[in-house]
Amino acid sequence: MDLHWDGEPPIVHMENITKRFGSIVALDNVTFTVERHQVMALLGDNGAGKSTLIKILTGVHRPTSGRIYFEGKLVNIESPRQARDLGIETVYQDLALVDLMSITRNFFLGRELTRRVGPLEWLDMKQMDHATAEVLRDIGITVRSPRERVGKLSGGERQSVAIGRAMYFGAKLLILDEPTSALSVAETRRVLDHILEVKEKGLSVIFITHNVYHVYEVADAYTILRHGKKVGTYRKGELSVNDIADLITGVREK
């Protein structure tokens, strides 16, 4: 049954999500909502339940109980492909990029454009190169050629390629898993700027991290998990950086 919303429904609403692995309760009755055109930070220490919640949203795990609504409609997300078909794109910490392959081949990995003449079909590298170069220009990355190997790019450039790929394929909700880990200060700044650009283009963003400082200026709201339970959701300006850090670690309750 779809829920009734006052006005436009949120892009995603996860209601009373519980996930058990045998006797271990990874998530305990967690409700998580991301509004349209919102950057939502999902914060918590290691083991807080962040990854499990996102794996449920992206079809890697099935919840033990609870419901997921996407754009106001009740959905059962049973695979990552089904999540992508809905418009949910995830940029994981390891990026899932192949160093020895070109930027273009990585950009279209699993979604290659092809040309067919009669019974013959082959990769349309010209069109894919053009699309890749155009997206890279839009997000401020200059490369000698889209045929350049991904392994030659810096960490920040690789993150930018992954974000650009998600934007190109029509994501409605972009999930970023620790996107600033192991980046320099300048590269972190570039990725944070990309997040704001993604929001301006109409996407919603879930920014998963344990680094409060990296999300404080770009997030519109913060949802904090601790030991598989939701501590709360707070709007930007309600909490200081120290408040958020204390709630993550359990030093204080709010």
Image (tube, rainbow, N blue to C red):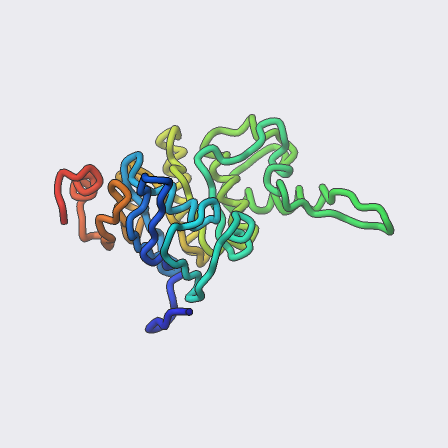
Classify the position of the N terminus by image quarter. Answer: bottom left
Locate residue 92, reporting x and y percent.
46, 38
Q: Can residue 166 be seen?
A: yes
Tell me which residue sits at (29%, 48%) in the image: 28
In-image side of 109 versus 23 (left or right): right
Locate residue 47, reporting x and y percent.
31, 36
In-image side of 32 versus 87 (left or right): left
Q: Looking at the image, is 96 positioned above or below residue 79?
A: above
Locate residue 46, reporting x and y percent.
30, 34
Tell me which residue sits at (35%, 71%) in the image: 5
Say which quarter of the image contains residue 65: bottom left
Tell me which residue sits at (39%, 59%) in the image: 67
Q: Residue furthest right?
A: 118
Relative depth, front residue between 185 and 250: 250
In-image side of 217 versus 176 (left or right): left
Q: Can residue 194 be seen?
A: no
Relative depth, front residue between 28 and 238: 28
In-image side of 126 versus 14 (left or right): right
Relative depth, front residue between 200 and 24: 24
Relative depth, front residue between 240 and 24: 24
Q: Looking at the image, is 249 positioned above or below residue 239?
A: above
Locate residue 96, reporting x and y percent.
53, 35
